[in-house]
Amino acid sequence: MARTGDLFGNLARKAAREDASTSARHGTPGEAGYTAASIEVLEGLEPVRRRPGMYIGGTDEAALHHLFAEVLDNAMDEAVAGHATFIDVRLEGTGFLSVTDNGRGIPVDPHPKFPKKSALEVILTTLHAGGKFDSGAYQTSGGLHGVGVSVVNALAERLEVEVARGQVLYRQIYERGHPTGKLEQVGKVSNRRGTNVRFKPDEQIFGKGAAFKPARLFKMARAKAYLFGGVEIRWRCAPELLGADSAIPAEATFHFPGGLKDFLVQDIAGKDLVAEQIFSGKVEKPGGHGSLEWAITWLGLDDGFVHSYCNTIPTPDGGTHEAGLRAALARGLKDHAERIGQAKRAAQITSEDVMTSCAAIVSVFLREPEFQGQNKGRLMTTEASRIVEGSLRDSFDHWLADSPSAAGKLLDFVIERAEERLRRRAEKDVQRKAASRKLRLPGKLADCTNATSEGSEIFIVEGDSAGGSAKQARDRATQAVLPLRGKILNVANATRDKLAANAQLSDLVLALGCGTGTHYKEQDLRYEKVIVMTDADVDGAHIASLLITFFYRQMPKLVEGGHLYLAVPPLYRLTQGTTQVYARDDAHRDELMAKVLTGKGKVEVSRFKGLGEMMPAQLKETTMDKEKRNLLRVVVLEEDQPATSDSVERLMGNKPEARFAFIQERAAFAAAADLVVL
């Protein structure tokens, strides 16, 4: 028998041989080859060149232009701090880009921790070195990690920096992050101060032919000028880099005292607005703890957008400042609705409804902001949400109160967005249910036997009594009848919840089968004609107007397609001997008595109280027979669209003062016609 020690020894030697064999096959070091010498230490800026994506997000076009953003941000920090009034941006035909400011200039004296190097060289060659860590140097700034300009230096084929400070001009040159020589004094300057950084991206990093795009640089520089109205940014570009038809000028100066309002006006040029007034303003927090500037409007036909910035740094991924913006606008609008007695209509409003068409630019300045990642795409500072929401709420409340017309238009617009959202959700629920079971038609619908919509028509009548007569008078093959009980809901001033809960309108939509709003489908309409048939009196006219309003608001394409009609039932029956005729109204009655019933004998005049009083044969003869009846098609001419929309809103909307004004304007007409208002 083998000894236990020998057995384990043999197993160990076998495992060692297998490790060596595996290492040889796969090229991986075994335990013996993994030593302290295997640990590589990257010094200086070498980590940036090895892994540029960790610092600028990659090596694509966006990352390339991020280099410009880093240098421009440093110059903007000087301007925001009050030390610079202008910034020069110049793109040369050689591919070099330079950014110059007239600020204090980067310090050039020896650094206390590195006495053999100037502070300038330390900043350009050391990660996490800069003046942004000392709150005494900058109250607010964009570059807080101390890696911006050093990363640019690391990823530049060549970088030249000039500093004018203390009436002396200094210069130092770098290649791929390494200085080619010591900081040198160029000479005396009496009328110059600030920093100039001139660099060219390294093709070893960004690929052969990598170059800045003039249009992109132009837009970035202009945006910075909007963000801080006190700075002037001068743009110059080599003409050979611009095409003959380029919209980018070779030279331009950006200076926008109006700040973000000017920015927004430029962004929304040519677009329809819900209200012409732009909500804009600026608030400085006491004690230098930050500031907020904003410009906001709402687009009538386009999707909205939010451009947010922190310390002039764009935050395309949003963050806490955008969360504060959304909360302030949604709560402010709902509070305004409550103040003017519209709380029920606005109850369903969410921040999504407010922001869908909102075009906003918001810029916040904070002392020590926290970003997600070196690219600073998302602001994470919790305090920003509180600052933005608190500052905006007060200003938004005042703006709504001071601009009642704009506030009313905005509230109505947002409520419509909320109703549309709820409608889409309800229709999705219906579609989901319809997928699992057959769609059932309303119980009171007497449908026709025609299997296609062509030649088919549906009569919408008021009440079961009229419905009974109509069902007996109809042509069963082509005519359907749907009775509705009394006056339907006025959709022009009803909330989406009420509309969705209304059984009569649900039955009507179900019977037609074509859907409502943006989900209306012409091919699914079950009838060629939709005929509103109500009593020939004031109540009947009111019910007809409510139904027309429903179709105009909820199914406008049904009206545009020429499918909506009004039946013309008689109000009177006139009998003279064996002669019997029907009159639509008082004027028609008088006309018939004067021109038709001229023979001898007394004329008996019977007034129908409603369609339910008519015998089925009479209803068929006067109103439903396709050969004898009269129908009125409901149309809205294109040139009459604005006036029609205004009339519907004025007479059927939720503002009684508008209807009262309408009555007052026509008081003389009512008196002249000797009308009695009951």
Image (cartoon, rainbow, N blue to C red):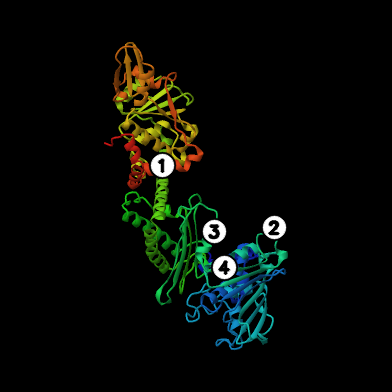
When the figure is inspected, residue 532 is found, relative to residue 81, above or below; the finding is above
Q: Amino acid at mark 4?
A: Met
Point out the tag, 1 or 2, that comes first from the N-terminus: 2
Q: How far is the residue under mark 4 from the one under mark 1?
A: 60 Å
Q: Which residue is mark 3?
A: 267
Q: Which residue is mark 1?
A: 647
| In-image side of 635 versus 585 (left or right) | right
Q: How far is the residue under mark 1 from the one under mark 2?
A: 48 Å
Point out the tag, 3 or 2, that comes first from the N-terminus: 2
Q: Dot 1 lies on which element? A: helix
**Quarter-wise, where is residue 432 in the image?**
top left
Q: Amino acid at mark 1?
A: Ser
When the figure is inspected, residue 60 is found, relative to residue 132, above or below; the finding is above
Q: How far is the residue under mark 4 from the one under mark 3?
A: 32 Å
**Quarter-wise, where is residue 564 in the image?**
top left
Q: How far is the residue under mark 1 from the one under mark 3?
A: 33 Å
Q: Which residue is mark 4?
A: 54
Q: Label for residue 245?
A: 2
Q: Is residue 414 visible?
A: yes
Percent across and percent down for residue 290 are 44, 72
